[in-house]
Amino acid sequence: MADQNTLNVIIVGGGFCGLTTAIDCKLKGFNPILLESHPTSRTQGDVLDFMHNAGRHFLAWDNGSVGKRLLETGVHTAKSLDYYSSKGDLLFSEPWIFRDDHYYTQYAGHRGEQHQILADYAQSLGVDMRFGPGRTVVQYIDTDSETGVITQDGSRILGDVVLACDGPRSLARSQVLGLPDTKVNSGYAIYRAYYELNDELRSNPLIARLCNPDEDQAAMFLGKDMHAFVYTWGKATQLAWVLTHKDDQDIGESWSFPGRLEDALADLERGGFTDMLREVVRHTPTDRLVDYKLVWREPLETWLSASKKIAVMGDAAHCHLPTSAQGACQAVEDAVTVASCLGHAKGDVKLALQVFERIRFNRSHVIHMSSLSNRDIAHTIDWTTENGEKFSDTLSIPHDDWIIEYDCKADTDKHFDRLASEVSSGKLGTIQELSLPAGGSFKPIPDHLKRDKETSLTSSGVQAQAVSINI
């Protein structure tokens, strides 16, 4: 058993999951070592959303200063999220903030800036962060006597526990869990872009409909097999847009490519999208556009190594499609939960990771699978003005209490002792049976709302199975 006061936690991957894990471990008095192959904190990207179930933990850091920085650098004066048909007809609007007490815990902004805020806080705490290609993990060590990693520069780094937050291309999935190194295209890709707005762009009558110096704007556009988001913020000085589109090409060695503006515009043309959205896309600097293949991973049977001293987390464990609207939030929940479990276990890392898995498994699985259902709701329903009025709750970004009011730290505090007792006693059952209930469920879209009544939800790359589930 490791010494609780000198617990050495190796964290592979410096994304939001890894950074949050490192920060919470440091705050608990552990010795986290974060390894990230990128040379610095991330500076690229478009927009990333965090709902209250993740934001509440950011706000808890440093007397609220981290959360307030996240809020101020992103969308925070918006009144609504507006839903449009592909033709530009307003379908309906919903409040940007559903509950007043979520104002300081709901964030949407440039992911590079958000990442830098977390990295700055981690640095201020003295987290040992090692960036650069030489820090790329090339081998995991998982034996009876040693736990750790070997990096590209030849360093052998040993610890008490390894937390693999190394994303959807996770090396830990193959080396630690023994899974095949498959690259699965979901059938879709996403254009991502961010750029600054100047006076000339703000005066463009089409773009002006989506930017207001006095109020941040958020809009979603819905078309057949495509949907887009546009956000403007910072007194109409910053704009980000994303467009999910069909992509059936095989995944090669890279999942992210420089985007071609003419391809994005051609997709919008084929989809019959409004000039308002086309104008936003047309003014994107060519070096700011990325085309990223959306990867689907089937749910895992376990997140733990044979030794129970290595765990996969975040996208490495559950690679969400963006339509779950919870991918980043679930990564944060993983991070906060594992740090809390390590704190409760008082040095027994095997116990900590097994309880961590049982707290997270079912909840993460149900929300993970919802991304398929949510995608097909956006792409398959014929979003006329009439359907928008009648069925707005079907499309609305999920705000169920069981999702966004969830407090993973409180849940860990509540259930740790019981689950730890069940682990120690060797209680038998499947991981689904041994884990906490998910807390809620999602339902498939009604057949009568589909654009093509003959088209099943399995027609778009990945099968939308097990979305009506409550475990």
Image (cartoon, helix red, strand yellow):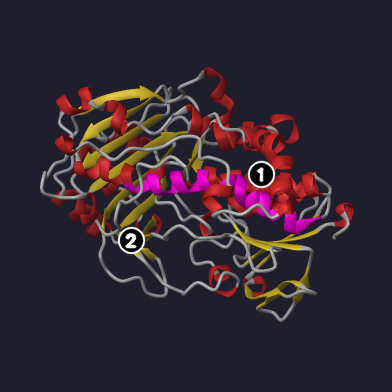
Counting from the top left corner in percent of width and height, residue 397 is at 38, 33
| Quarter assignment of residue 68 | top right
Which mark is drawn over residue 285?
Answer: none
Would residue 288 be found to the left or right of residue 173 on screen? left
| SS state under label 1 | helix
Which mark is drawn over residue 336?
Answer: 1
Q: Crowding near pointer 1: few (<14 within 10 Å), some, many (20+)?
A: many
- Looking at the rendering, the stretch of residues picked out in magenta corresponds to 348-372
Residue at 45% from the left image edge and 33% from the top image edge: 233
Would residue 38 be found to the left or right of residue 88 on screen? right
What amino acid type is highlighted by mark number 2?
Gly
Counting from the top left corner in percent of width and height, residue 205 is at 24, 32
Position of residue 444 relative to residue 292, above or below, is above
What amino acid type is highlighted by mark number 1?
Val
Residue at mark 2: 259
Residue at 35% from the left image edge and 45% from the top image edge: 467
| Quarter assignment of residue 274 | top left
How many callouts does the rendering have? 2
